[in-house]
């Protein structure tokens, strides 16, 4: 990526190479610059990094040889940028960012990856049903695992073609895309994005890249807020004009998924969905309430929010709490698309999904 | 298995108070929630309020749900029953409700306030398994009221004839029992409350909080908290305190305790330890250990583990594009 770091505060701490960016969903105690600073200070402390403001909404986390820039202009959805090695950013991300209940990855549905602008250079599809359906399949879903990268003109078409085939459509998840952006004034850039909110960019203009990142952030924010507005279940007292009495009113819908194919082994599906492990990180003591039908009052361990899931081989319902983060539902959907069936959708999806 | 048997099994094994199945079914039929058919919604019905206060010439009562429709203008006062008995005194109050009664306590939706002729009728809601008992009860009391029953495979509305704007239905479906929007109420048994208090404490552990106010737990698990009278709130708080003591002695032993309130303050739950504070390498195992303990407490046994295979994703791409 072109552009040189100054000789001042950053000298020697910004290596040349690809820029790795991460879209972050943040829950600072206070949605303000002070809140962002406090949350980043806690990350800096545990990661043994220095924290310094670069401007009102841009922060530098640094060590003696690496720099990580955090853009907190949007108080809830942040962007992390670095040219550090992939191994370094991965370690920092896992141990000090997403391990905090106040920070989470973005979980982009396939539709948001498809919306990434520019000329498509390649796409990647990665699918594995090993976690949710570990036993050998004798049913309609074949294959159980794949990793495919398609390069060339209109690489989306091959995945689209595969998605139409009954035998393979469940596995045809969209995991990552790479795109080439050209701007006559600013220059060129190649950006790759994955469904976990990771971006890698190279080229002659970071301005071109950051424009794409901000647009992606805006789309993702709209998606998550739509999920919350529609599916957070709220009850409130409805005061009356005519007396001191009040009644109860409800808002919000129950999120509902009609599984594209039947869950072959619902016991294994439930056991492995609620085993506290990544990527779902759901804690619950589920209970079978009828033959093949389960209910669970669960906790999303990423952020410490409660939700309820009701499921059977053909469907799943998700009942979000009043304050349960929309990112919890986004994560569940994105990971069901990569681990159960790529065609998994909410039964009446919000516009952005 | 006969339908009644299926219903009986569901209702005894639910992780939701079975008394709330009828009201959850009524809500689902209005909105088509969670794959349920919107059979009342399709007839034009909308929900107005739950637990509204009704004053009649007989005496006051709380109406489980008020639903209504326009053209023809009709208000249904729903009485939800989990068993097979009809309480005559209560039923007579529903039967005696008039437009003036509804206006008096604002149980009339605003869109109907200027309407000249609004019909009002009671609607009894129960579970499919108890339909025959409910029909008998209504007949014995000579109550000509529609009966709605909900079940995991079938929903039925009968005796709507004579009520302009309400039509009978008998519908088979495969969406199971209705989505549990309401899981407990202030009269639910401790065992049902425990199913909800436990995840609230685990969530606080995941957020690495030290203190959880007892009222915040009550508010989180009890939808009717906002309209509950002070006395009933106090009773429910005591119920939750009792549940927390049991959890602290069993499923969450060593993880939390109940600290009594002093100087008029409410009690609070003190979180003494959390798997979230473990090193990342052992954190998941610590959560799983706590989960197994909870399973033994709630279900009498830990769930069998069904291990997944190591996937290519696990091996190669946990960091996504960072690996590229």
Image: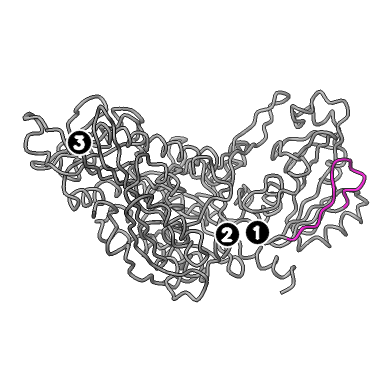
Position of residue A208 measured from the top left corner of the image (x, y, whole percent)? 27, 33
Q: Are marks 2 and 1 on the same chain?
A: no
Q: Which residue is mark 1?
A: B175
Chain letter for the residue marked with disc 2 in the picture: A
Residue B72 among those drawn in magenta: no
Residue at disc 3, secondary structure: loop
Chain letter for the residue marked with disc 1 in the picture: B
Query: What's the image's color scheme?
Result: one colour
Q: Are marks 2 and 1 in contact (CB under 8 Å)?
A: yes
User: Magenta part of the protein: which range?
Assistant: B159-172
Q: Are marks 3 and 2 on the same chain?
A: yes
Residue at disc 2, secondary structure: strand
Residue at disc 1, secondary structure: loop
* Residue nearest the observer in this picture, A117 or A280: A117
Please, is residue B153 above or below residue A328 in the view? below
Which quarter of the figure is the N terminus of chain B placed in?
Answer: bottom right
Question: Of marks 3 and 2, which one's residue comes earlier in the chain?
Answer: 3
Q: Are marks 1 and 3 on the same chain?
A: no
Numbered marks: total = 3
Q: State the predominant SS element of the stretch in magenta.
A: loop
Position of residue A198 measured from the top left corner of the image (x, y, whole percent)? 30, 46
Taking the image as shown, residue A191 lies to the left or right of residue A244, namely left
Q: Which residue is mark 2?
A: A315
């Amino acid at each position: 990526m072109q552009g040189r770091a100054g000789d001042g505060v950053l000298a020697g701490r910004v290596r040349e190479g690809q820029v790795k960016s991460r879209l972050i969903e943040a829950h600072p105690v206070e949605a303000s610059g002070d809140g962002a600073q406090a949350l980043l200070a806690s990350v800096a402390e545990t990661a043994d990094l220095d924290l310094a403001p670069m401007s009102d909404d841009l922060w530098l986390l640094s060590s003696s040889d690496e720099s990580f820039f955090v853009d907190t202009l949007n108080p809830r959805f942040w962007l992390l940028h670095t040219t550090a090695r992939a191994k370094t950013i991965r370690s920092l991300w896992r141990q000090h960012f997403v391990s905090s209940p106040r920070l989470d990855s973005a979980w982009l549905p396939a539709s948001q990856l498809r919306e990434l602008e520019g000329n498509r250079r390649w796409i990647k599809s990665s699918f594995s049903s090993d976690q949710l359906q570990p036993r050998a399949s004798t049913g309609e879903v074949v294959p159980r695992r794949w990793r495919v990268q398609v390069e060339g003109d209109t690489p989306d078409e091959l995945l689209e073609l595969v998605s139409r085939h009954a035998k393979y459509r469940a596995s045809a998840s969209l995991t990552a895309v790479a795109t080439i952006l050209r701007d006559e004034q600013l220059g060129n850039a190649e950006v790759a994005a994955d469904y976990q909110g990771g971006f890698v960019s190279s080229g002659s203009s970071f301005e071109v890249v950051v424009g794409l990142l901000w647009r992606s952030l805006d789309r993702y924010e709209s998606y998550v807020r739509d999920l919350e507005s529609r599916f957070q279940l709220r009850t409130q007292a409805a005061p009356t004009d005519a007396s001191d009495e009040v009644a109860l009113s409800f808002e919000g819908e129950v999120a509902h998924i009609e599984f594209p194919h039947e869950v072959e082994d619902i016991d294994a599906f439930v056991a492995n969905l609620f085993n506290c492990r990544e990527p779902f990180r759901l804690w619950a003591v589920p209970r079978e309430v009828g033959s093949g039908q389960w209910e669970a009052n669960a906790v999303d361990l990423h952020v410490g929010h409660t939700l309820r899931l009701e499921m059977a081989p053909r469907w799943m319902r998700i009942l979000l709490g009043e304050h349960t983060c929309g990112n919890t539902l986004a994560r569940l959907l994105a990971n069901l698309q990569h681990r159960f069936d790529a065609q998994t959708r909410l039964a009446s999806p919000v516009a952005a999904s | 298995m006969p339908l009644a048997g299926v219903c009986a099994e569901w209702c005894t094994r639910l992780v939701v108070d079975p008394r709330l199945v009828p009201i959850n079914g009524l809500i689902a039929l209005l909105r088509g929630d969670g794959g349920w058919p919107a059979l009342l919604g399709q007839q034009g019905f909308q929900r107005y309020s739950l637990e509204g206060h009704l004053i009649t010439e007989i005496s006051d009562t709380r109406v489980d749900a008020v639903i209504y429709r326009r053209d023809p203008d009709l208000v249904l006062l729903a009485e939800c029953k989990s068993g097979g008995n009809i309480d005559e005194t209560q039923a007579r109050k529903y039967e005696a409700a008039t437009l003036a009664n509804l206006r008096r306590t604002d149980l009339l939706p605003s869109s109907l306030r200027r309407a000249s002729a609004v019909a009002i009728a009671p609607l009894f809601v129960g579970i499919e398994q108890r339909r025959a008992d409910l029909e008998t009860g209504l007949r014995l009391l000579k109550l000509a009221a529609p009966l709605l029953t909900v079940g995991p495979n079938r929903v039925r509305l009968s005796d709507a004839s004579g009520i302009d704007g309400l039509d009978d239905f008998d519908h088979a479906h495969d969406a199971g029992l209705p989505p549990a929007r309401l899981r407990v109420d202030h009269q639910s048994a401790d065992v049902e409350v425990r199913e909800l208090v436990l995840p609230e404490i685990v969530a606080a552990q995941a957020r690495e909080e030290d203190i959880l106010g007892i009222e915040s737990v009550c508010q989180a698990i009890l939808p009717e908290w906002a309209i509950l009278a002070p006395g009933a709130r106090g009773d429910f708080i005591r119920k939750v305190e009792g549940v927390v003591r049991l959890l602290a002695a069993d499923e969450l032993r060593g993880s939390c305790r109940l600290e009594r309130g002093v100087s008029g303050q409410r009690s609070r739950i003190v979180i003494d330890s959390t798997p979230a504070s473990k090193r990342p390498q052992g954190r998941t195992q610590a959560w799983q250990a706590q989960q197994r303990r909870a399973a033994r407490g709630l279900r009498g046994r830990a769930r069998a583990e069904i291990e997944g295979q190591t996937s290519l994703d696990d091996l190669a791409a946990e960091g996504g594009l960072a690996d590229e």
